[in-house]
Amino acid sequence: MNEPSITNLGEALAWARKIVPPAEARLLLRHVCRQSAAHLAAWPEEALPPPQWDAFRALVARRAEGEPVAYLLGEREFYGRNFLVNSRVLIPRPETELLVELALAHFSHVPHLKALDLGTGSGVLAITLALELDHPRIVALDWSREALKVAMTNAMRHAANVSFLCSDWFTGLGRETFQLIVANPPYVAEDDPHLALGDLRYEPRRALAAGASGLSELTAIVAGAGRHLQPGGWLFMEHGYDQSAAVRALLADAGFADIASWQDLAGIERASGGRWTG
Ligand code: GLN
């Protein structure tokens, strides 16, 4: 990229739009200037100081290389709130809001719910449930200490009451039991070509990939969940677009009842779950 002489917001935007999609150019410029979209639209003549132009150019260059917008901005929205993200955590995806909706549909009337979020990452599920349910007691765990730092920062940012635990699935939980377990585990097959495309190239591999079939972590979760669910408690898991039948079979083998799958907004069966009868 050569270095045009850019002096104002409008010129900077016009320059960036030749390199990245317009919506991304606007997001990156807003981030650098700390301004609203309306401000950018209304004041294209406003001066862009050289340090901000340098910062903007650097972000556009990184985006052009493929770095995810969420990591460049350092945040991503989930269920109407902004969450800090970095390359140690999966970028929150809209389809994961389905797990929030399932939890609320089953438990919004239950005060002091005991719930567990497995593989919390940036903490979006645990924190959203902490804020949407009625005074729940939520444990969120992850094997990654770096992910837990992000999740704890997010919990502080949103003043959400969540207990965090460093644990490889259930290993660190002792005999604790819950009324609800949610999980958005890794579920992409190791050889899935999507891992080499787009944002996924930059995301933690261990948060995405799960064995040859993509089912290894879902299998471990279903196998261990019964010991940590109270009778009548629910397990809800996100999974891949073609894994719902396999996950329902895992749940049936483990003795769950009321097994079902639910569609995301794109009409894809994206979550499955069941009730533990004890
Ligand atoms: N839905 C993600 C993707 O395929 C994967 C997320 C996950 O493995 N939990 O891009």
Image (cartoon, grey):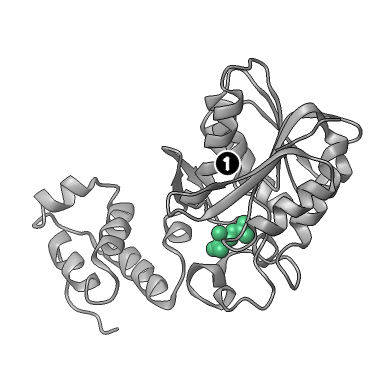
Q: Quick check: 228 above or below 12? A: above
Residue 233: image x %, image y %?
75, 29
The three-letter amino acid code for the residue at tag 1 is: Leu
Depth check: give the residue in front, 42 or 50.
42
What residue is at 60 percent from the left and 60 percent from the top?
Answer: 240
Using residue 264 as the reference point, say whether residue 234 is left or right of it.
right
> Residue 236: in sight, yes or no?
no
What residue is at 49 percent from the left and 52 percent from the top?
Answer: 93
Depth check: give the residue in front, 7 or 169.
169
In the picture, residue 32 is in which quadrant?
Answer: bottom left
In the picture, residue 160 is in which quadrant?
Answer: top right
Residue 264: image x %, image y %?
49, 49
Using residue 62 as the reference point, say whether residue 47 is left or right of it.
left
In the picture, residue 171 is in which quadrant?
Answer: top right
Quadrant for the N terminus, please: bottom left
Image quarter for ligand 1 equals bottom right
Depth check: give the residue in front, 68 or 35.
68
> Residue 31: in sight, yes or no?
yes
What residue is at 82 percent from the left and 53 percent from the top?
Answer: 220
Q: Quick check: 57 above or below 191? A: above
What residue is at 79 percent from the left and 47 percent from the top?
Answer: 252
Q: Label 1, on which residue?
A: 99
Question: Under tag 1, what secondary structure?
Answer: helix
Q: Tell which residue pokes out farthest to the bottom in this image.
A: 2
Q: Is label 1's Cβ within 8 Å of ligand 1?
A: no
Q: Quick check: 150 above or below 228? A: below
Quadrant for the C terminus, please: top right
Using residue 219 as the reference point, say whether residue 131 is left or right of it.
left
Depth check: give the residue in front, 184 or 150.
184
